[in-house]
Amino acid sequence: MIKPVYPENGAEISFLTPAFREFIRRQKAGLMDLHPDDESVNDWIPEGEENSFYNKAKANLSHPAVLYFRWECDDPARLMDLEISEDADFSAPSPVTAGRIFAMAGERTFCCPVTNFRGGKRYFWRVVADDGSRSEVRCFTTPADEVRPLFIDGCSNVRDIGGRRTEDGRTVRQGMIYRGVELEDDEVRDHRLTDRGRRTFILELGIRTDLDLREEAGGRVVRTGDWGDVRYVLRPCESWGRTLSGEWAQRMRDVMEVVLDPANYPLYFHCYAGADRTGTVGTYLDCLLGLPKEVIKFNFSVTSLSCFDKRNWTLHGYREEFLADLDRMYPEAGGVRSEMIKAHLLAIGIKKKMIDGFLDFMVE
């Protein structure tokens, strides 16, 4: 007999770690708008608490939480599989990342670590043994409208742009566009995608297009190993206000022609750290999709949880100036960010049909 233990039936379980949840709390408290060296910030940090907001040690806190499924089996010699699906009939497995099943507590309790769940979903799970026996089916849900970080072995700062609610109450589709850091490089060793991480990209996320925004990637070896049918596309771009005019505006057009085309999905776009160039493209998409400004600011600043330097939306003023410049360039948009970005995309040569097709596909 196989008896499920955890998660409990009907539970709601967050895929965010304590560090992520604390980061969100501080954002809502207004701490994200303070200068990183502002002494008053220390008043908000409980004594003895790890300072995950500044991440001075450059530890990688950008991964999602790991959920440890547990069950009991009265025949420990059985070979067992953990099945997880968003369908009650288990017609299709969910694209989550699972580790190995291991025995614990006298070899009659078994455990399997799983991560990379999607937000706002109901999951069904069961355990199936090699003799055909099955456990009862249990279900749990994940909270809606939360940032969805990804665990990609060897990388940091990888997130799904979907899952968040737009200002008009709709939801951005998950599992289609991901943002993050560079994957491999023959000259940079800050992170190195492992074979396991590559399998997550190819098999679990099903990535079809690897969009590289780095001008410095030209002429380098940027991919090793077997990438199957994943297409590599190099489209160098700059960040923030520099993308609004001249040569860099035309280069941004080249980038957006790739990003806005659902034929390229699932798509992963990145620069080096997944912060500024990636953050700029991410802000274009966040604005176009109609996300609230607080979410747009968060999507940039949360890079602070990765293994790179801290990021702050208001620091240096680049990002606020970017939105203000768009407002001045397109006064007919009436200050509506989605209309400002749409007008700019049209001005640099993106077809209206492509913009409308992207929105129809990505906003549920």
Image (tube, rainbow, N blue to C red):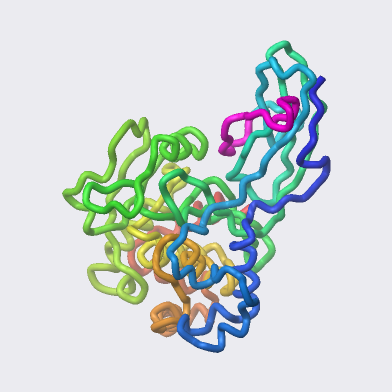
Indicate whether residue 97 is drawn in magenta: yes
Q: Which residue is at the front of the view, 251 or 317?
A: 317
The magenta region covers 93-110
Q: Main secondary structure of the magenta part?
A: loop
Kindly identify the residue that appears in the image at 55 percent across and 49 percent down.
361
Task: State whether residue 231 appears in this view.
Answer: yes
- Spot occupied by residue 304 in the image (x, y as percentages of width and height): 47, 67
Indicate whether residue 122 is drawn in magenta: no
- Spot occupied by residue 70 in the image (x, y as percentages of width and height): 73, 35
| Left or right for 204, reference 239 | right
Q: Which residue is at the front of the view, 89 or 73?
A: 73
Task: State whether residue 342 appears in this view.
Answer: no
- Spot occupied by residue 279 in the image (x, y as percentages of width and height): 42, 65
| Left or right for 234, reference 108 | left
Q: Which residue is at the front of the view, 343 or 219?
A: 219
Kindly identify the residue that appears in the image at 47 percent across and 80 percent down.
36
Instruction: Give the number of marks.
Output: 0
Q: Which residue is at the front of the view, 293 or 26?
A: 26
Outermost left residue: 219
Q: Is residue 258 above or below residue 87?
A: below
Kindly identify the residue that appears in the image at 47 percent across and 57 percent down.
60
Kindly identify the residue that appears in the image at 68 percent across and 26 percent down.
91
Instruction: Pick the quarter of the image with the N terminus.
Output: top right
Q: Quadrant of residue 162?
A: bottom right
- Spot occupied by residue 344 in the image (x, y as percentages of width and height): 40, 70
Outermost top residue: 131
Q: Is residue 160 above or below residue 243?
A: above
